[in-house]
Amino acid sequence: MRTLMLGAMLAIGLAAHAQDALPPPMDPAPADPALRPVLDDFGGREGLGALMDDFMVILLEDPRTQPFFEYSDQAAVKEHLADQFCVILGGDCRYEGRDMRAAHKGMELRQLEFNALVEDLQIAMERRGIPFRAQNRLLAKLAPMQRDMIEK
Amino acid sequence: MHPTALRAAYDRQASSAPARMSRPGFLRPLFACAALALLPFGAHAQIEGRSTSDKLLLTAGVSQVEGAAGGGLVPWGVIGGYGTRDQFGGSAFATRVELDDYALDSRGVLFGIFDRVEVSIAQQRFDTRAVGAALGLGRGFTLDQDIYGAKLRVFGDAVYDQDRWWPQISIGVQHKRHGDGAVVRSLGADDRGTDVYVAATKLYLAQSMLVNVTLRSTDANQLGLLGFGGDDGGRSLQLEGSVAWLLSRRFAVGAEYRGKPDNLSAVDEQHAWDVFAAWTLSKHLALTLAYVDLGTIAIADDQRGWYGSVQVGF
């Protein structure tokens, strides 16, 4: 029993340490053709563009996220985001932005700020009447990118 | 054990044992203060459910009856409160369970620190109502216990590891102290005990679903309300689980199962389950309603009924 517990603790310790080692940055726009129906729920590339307009308004109103967007090239950010989401949802788009780690390097983002962004995205999607299940299928693809964006 | 024999055993214990263990007098005022202190945090930044503590809604669970963050019956691997890894969070809860023959009141507070450590205190009062009279203890005799809990997240992230198979894993303890040593000793049980558990939780966003499995080492009878250990068993491993479906950002439904030991030959104990619905009315106010089945408790079978819980938190 004791050996088993020690073995388990060692395994957990090694796994936890492995999480800290910096792997290569994630693909920022991994395409999943199975999500095509979800893209339809979002109204295609056009719907995503309109969603990003609403999203940016909310980001600029939210004191937690405003500092990161107020001096950015907002039009370019919106275009990149719409393309990124389009590719992820299996659409016929091209994402031409940087990977998430490069795009956020030096911003010293904390988890609470990432969460604020997700919450603002949820509110934007809610306002546009995108079905909750479809929202979550997109968020499932975005959530792991947090790792590349948060300053360790 | 025949009610008369139980009464006689209780009297023997009561006369020979020291005076009823005094329970910390600070707990009730502490809860009141904690609940009041948390309200201003609730009033702050109420715009469409955003606030200064920034976990996503419902990802901290609610408070289970022993005070830990989780479902209604089962502690989960998530750390309570809405504080993220750079923040603090906390919550206070009050729960009432109305069964066919009994009632259970539970209230407590918890604090989450850096999304890594959770500490909690809870008080349970179990009203035996008419069964108390049948057992010779007196109608409406209440069995009380205090529960001191701690939890440590050791691995994984239930929300953000969407591209990984592994869950968030936490280890926890719940140290329980019964308020009426004479009664539990007359049953052949101890008046204090400690549960140790491992909980694994994962949010499957693509399915809008949360799953939790908890393995608990315990010798508590009826969560500890009938003492710890007995003539028919001691410590054992019990399996618990929860499943929740997120139906919207503020509403989830689910079901839970909780295996329980059966350590006392005099009385039967069975496994418990419930089905629940949870609403976050704001980031700071959550309401949970459940239908529970706790099986046989002491001499009364088929204890089913309603569970209602209010949680204030940040």
Image: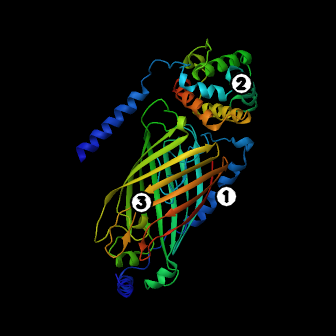
> Which residue is under mark 1?
B36
Q: Amino acid at mark 2?
A: Gly
- Residue corresponding to mark 2: A47
> Measuring 44% from the left and 45% from the top, which residue is drawn there?
B152
| Whether labels 2 and 3 share one chain | no
Structural crowding at the residue carrying mark 2, measured as other residues with C-alpha within 10 Å and reported as few (<14), some (14–19) or many (≥20): some
Real-space CA distance between mark 1 and mark 2, rounded to the nearest whole angstrom: 45 Å
Disc 3 to disc 1: CB gap under 8 Å: no
Q: Position of residue A122 (x, y in %)?
A: 66, 35
Q: Is residue B79 left or right of residue A4?
A: right
Q: Amino acid at mark 3?
A: His
Question: Is B90 located above or below residue A103 in the figure?
Answer: below
Q: Residue at x 58, y 14 (%)?
A: A98
| Mark 1 chain | B
Residue B21's image quarter? Answer: bottom left
Q: Residue A27: horizontal and vertical position, in percent?
A: 52, 18
Closer to the camera in the image, B146 or B308: B308
Element at label 3:
strand
